[in-house]
Image (spheres, helix red, strand yellow):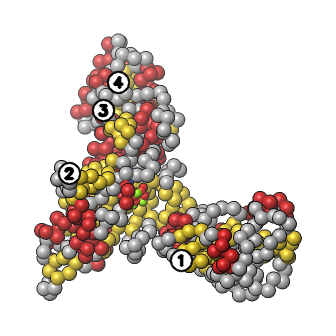
Amino acid sequence: MRFSRLFAPTKKESPADAEIPSHKLLTRAGFIRKVASGLYDILPLGTRVILKVEKIVREEMNSAGAQEVILPIMHPSELWQESGRWDVYGKEMIKFKDRHERDYALGPTAEEVITDLVRKEVKSYKDLPLNLYQIGRKFRDEIRPRFGLMRAREFIMKDAYSFHTSDEDAEREYWNMYETYSRIFKRMGLEFKAVLADTGEIGGNFSHEFLVIADTGESKLVYCEKCGYAASTEKAAQRRPQVPEGRATKFKEVEKVHTPRIRRIEEVSEFLKVPQEDILKLLVYVVDGKPVAVAIRGDREVEETKLKNAFRAKEVRLATDEEIEEFTGQPKGYLSPVNLSIPVYADYSVIPMVNFVAGAGEEDYHLKNVNWGRDFEVKDFIDVSEVRSGEPCPECGAPLVQKRGIEVGHIFKLGTKYSQAMGATFVDEDGQEKPMVMGCYGIGITRVMAAAVEQNHDENGIVWPFEIAPFEVIVIPTNVKKDEIRSLAEDIYENLKREGFDVLIDDRNARPGFKFKDADLIGIPFQVIVGKRAPEGIVELKVRKSGERFEVEASKVGEKIR
Ligand code: ATP
Ligand code: MG
Ligand code: MG
Ligand code: MG
């Protein structure tokens, strides 16, 4: 490819709404353009990357025994009614009507459509197992589309679905996909971790997310360098040790202090000269109709979604002032965990607190030198705070490391949820009709491109891993008006193409500094700079990632890259 013909509109400025490097750089380097919120054009450079990502995914999925299909994007509502998800999927699903007033959705995922196909065509155990996948567009009307391709409303996903005669066979395929995903992301040259993830309503221990490690990632994970345990921070929180129940409620060392008209945490902190971190706060929630007190540290608010997860509850809300009085017999703002008649659950971060300050359950008084166990009882931990670096590994006790990551893949053992709801059954060897056991496996193809940039860039631009780079090599003649330079560059270009490389030649009549800037921004792994020593047949080879430069003979460039 010749740069003079390439549609790669590079820019100096980042888009105003771009918050993270991948969004900025993919726009500036001419890979993507925004059409509207969460909708993007993918330009030739971007398309080359996407096709390489897809190629790796196809090769590995095929060699793992999966078969590619193409399913419609437009899903009739009847199928989603059958699975029960038409009404529960929520606003993320884009729904519309056809000319006959029939309801449809743009598929956000395809369990229903694929289960419909398989239930109609597969009847016998002899036709199973089956793993079918597609690489296609998905539509999700995200509340907050952002970060460019990372969280778009229309994006490309590889989604695979497998069907089995038994739980064991579904489990075997699950680990087959686990290995396949590991190979895929390794081949792409990405640093990633497969972490245990929450299985939500389906339950069991069969869900892993594949996260590309990057500081800007929206997911948090912890892992153990000693034994290899890795989990999302929420999943890890479920493995925290339980609190031993303290029984003593005699306040031997507790000091009751007069704190006239002082209620707010900042006022208590100032008045008693204790840091806010050492003040315990109690919040009373109504969790599925039952009152629950949550002890938290300082003035952090407990997020309702975290409480929902911790209690596996449907509805969580803060109690009203009247309810607090009714449930606890204590006034709001002076609530004390001591002698409270409702259970106290503690945020994990309060457990190490000693000699702290708490309400006295009485207006104008606080308690000093309160201690867990000794002074009041804690029922249990809840995972309202995330697992952090340094906490013990639930498997081996070694300190965990916390990092951020980008979810690029997700594998899930579904069991019989969809096959049962939609009647996808088969006749087993013994003549019995049984529901198929299913699994599903997704990879965010367009998100992979963004994640790769998030992990691989520097102040000058993108640094593509070789396997998914839009071009592997760029040949840069420093001055196309000089014959020796231009003709040597053209020779190298032709030779590299013949040797099988993906090559771009910057044949533009422009200043070398301008060309170098573009080459760095676009992030092609190798640059061959043809300049002063062209008459001797010597060129410079620059490695984009390390910035190293070597002088090499023109005929040896291909060899050096390999
Ligand atoms: P997230 O937690 O980021 O919202 P998800 O868990 O909802 O993702 P899945 O349903 O597991 O996503 O879909 C499979 C894969 O599709 C994800 O692992 C991710 O890589 C990709 N993906 C999901 N939503 C988007 C999106 N809005 N834009 C781009 N890729 C996405
Ligand atoms: Mg989502
Ligand atoms: Mg997710
Ligand atoms: Mg997911």
Q: CA distance from mark 3 to mark 2?
A: 47 Å
Give the distance between the C-alpha atoms of the residues marked 2 and 1, in whole angstroms: 42 Å
Q: Residues within 10 Å of mark 1 (few under 14, many from 20)?
A: few
Residue 4 seen in this snapshot: yes
Closer mark to the observer between disc 1 and disc 3: 1
Q: Could you say which is closer to the camera, residue 448 or residue 434?
A: 434
Q: For numbered disc 3, what is the local secondary structure?
A: strand
Q: Position of residue 448 (x, y in %)?
A: 38, 49
Closer to the chain start, of discs 3 and 2, is 2
Q: Earlier in the sequence, mark 2 or mark 1?
A: 2
Relative to 538, does residue 340 appear above or below in the rendering? below
Q: Which mark is residue 503?
A: 3
Marks 4 and 3: in contact by CB < 8 Å? no
For ligand 3, which image quadrant applies?
bottom left
Which percent across, then down, holds residue 162?
25, 67
Dot 4 surroundings within 10 Å: few (below 14), some, or many (20 or more)? many
Q: Horizontally, is 107 left or right of 200 in the view?
A: left
Q: CA distance from mark 1 to mark 4?
A: 68 Å
The kind of residue tagged 1 is Gly
Would you name the residue on which mark 2 appears?
Answer: 98
Specify the amino acid type for callout 4: Asp
> Residue under circle 4?
506
Q: Callout 2 environment at 10 Å: few (<14), some (14 to 19), or many (20+)?
A: few
Mark 4 and mark 2 residues within 8 Å of each other at the beta carbon: no
Q: Going 43% across and 52% down the picture, which residue do you hit?
A: 143
Residue assigned mark 1? 289
Taking the spot 22% from the left edge, 72% from the top edge, the residue there is: 422
